[in-house]
Amino acid sequence: METENTELLRFTTAGSVDDGKSTLIGRLLYDSKAIFEDQYEAVRRASERRGEEEVNLALLTDGLRAEREQGITIDVAYRYFATPKRKFIIADTPGHIQYTRNMVTGASTANAAIILVDARKGIVEQTRRHAFIASLLQIPHLVVCINKMDLVDYNEEVYNTLKKEFEHFSYKLDVKDVHFIPISALRGDNVVDRSKNMPWYEGSTLLYYLENVHIGSDHNFIDTRFPIQYVIRPNTDAYHDYRSYAGRVSAGVVKKGDEVLLLPSGFKTRIARIDTFDGELQEAYPPMSVSLLLEEDFDLSRGDMIVREHNQPSVSQDIDVMVCWFNERPMQPQGKYRILHTTQEARCIVKEIRYKLDINTLHRDTANVHIGMNDIARLVIRTTKPLFFDSYRRNRQTGSLIFIDEGSNETVGAGMII
């Protein structure tokens, strides 16, 4: 049965309005026995009250009252479930254009994205937007579920046509692994159980795919990056000279005895020990949280980074970023913002807005650079101190940053370093 170290898969769902995302999640939870009888009962009663013939599984996930009343998803809803093979966190993100920022938030940590396509409507503008955002956020695995197959008589031709059309579009995107599954979330075809209605489909069910997709190599194990979060100095008699640096391994593998380079000072030393709450380790890798002891004492503090001499991140104050804007107040050209990057905090000025992206056509608009809520744009910022970063494509941890309004302290944007 489930062990402590069961792998965790985070996935996000996206699709146009009424493509059946919430029904699909409800079906996954119900068919994989991840909900309680009383929850199912409550949903059955609610479905009856609404005069629906079948139990509306979408009501399992639409937690906000406004969502239930309108029958739509507004905010990002996180759901947790587990099977004997894996644990799952689902970020159910809204499909409407005005919630692009919610989708970016829900998808930023995902290993996989499920994009739903209504078999009757085909590939619509929203499908392209979501696929683009998935590629922008470098989500490693994309699952395209052609849903509502029951409404097109489980026709293989319809499935093949939509599959071809999506493949043709996805060539323009930076997506490595795309998988297609014909499903009916309402009837449960190919979600958890294989469909008897589509004998022509020989691939796996959605749950089987989610349980077995290989996510071990989604992390970057090549470039060693250890941003320091906290310096541990107990100052007790037992640990009089103890000084270690706590943080999370963002990339690469650190081993006891490894020679490392300290940024920004440029000093070299070796790793003397790797400590954790449960005792000493010989090596650590992403996304483990550990504390490192070095052979010599150095004055390191939060925001500094431990790397390797022959594999260093970029260091600069001028940074090229794709940003998704979260706030009602538009981005100010030449505006000053606080930024958080790994464990580092700095301030920045928006030096130049290069273009705004039309997500639907992927067209770059250089004339209109008014960046409002949910807009995605490319800009150059100048920071008050050098940051140690990689491109977002290479490392999602060291390649992302967030913008904070200095006055209101609100998170106003998320950036991906190019």
Image: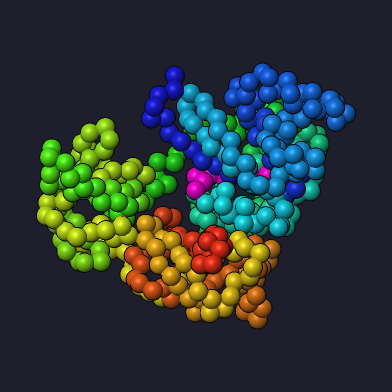
Residue 110 painted magenta: yes
Up the image or down, 327 lies above or below 244; here it is below
Please indicate, yes or no, whether residue 24 appears anywhere in the rendered image: no
Magenta residues, dominant SS class: strand
Q: Which residue is pictured at 28% across the width and 48% down the height?
A: 246
Judge by depth and name the residue closer to the eye, 234 or 164: 234
Q: Which colour scheme is used?
A: rainbow
Boundaries of the magenta span: 109-118
Residue 54 lies in quadrant:
top right
Q: Which residue is pictured at 75% across the width and 48% down the height?
A: 17
| Residue 79 image offset from top left, x and y in percent | 58, 35
| Residue 175 image offset from top left, x and y in percent | 53, 54
Q: Which residue is pictured at 59% across the width and 42% down the height?
A: 91
| Residue 411 image offset from top left, x and y in percent | 54, 59
Up the image or down, 255 lies above or below 323; here it is above
Q: Which residue is farthest right?
A: 51
| Residue 374 image offset from top left, x and y in percent | 64, 62
Residue 23 lies in quadrant:
top right
Q: In which quarter of the image is the N terminus?
A: top left
Residue 206 lies in quadrant:
top right
Q: Which residue is pictured at 11% across the width and 55% down the height?
A: 296
Q: In this view, does 189 lie to the left or right of 84?
A: right
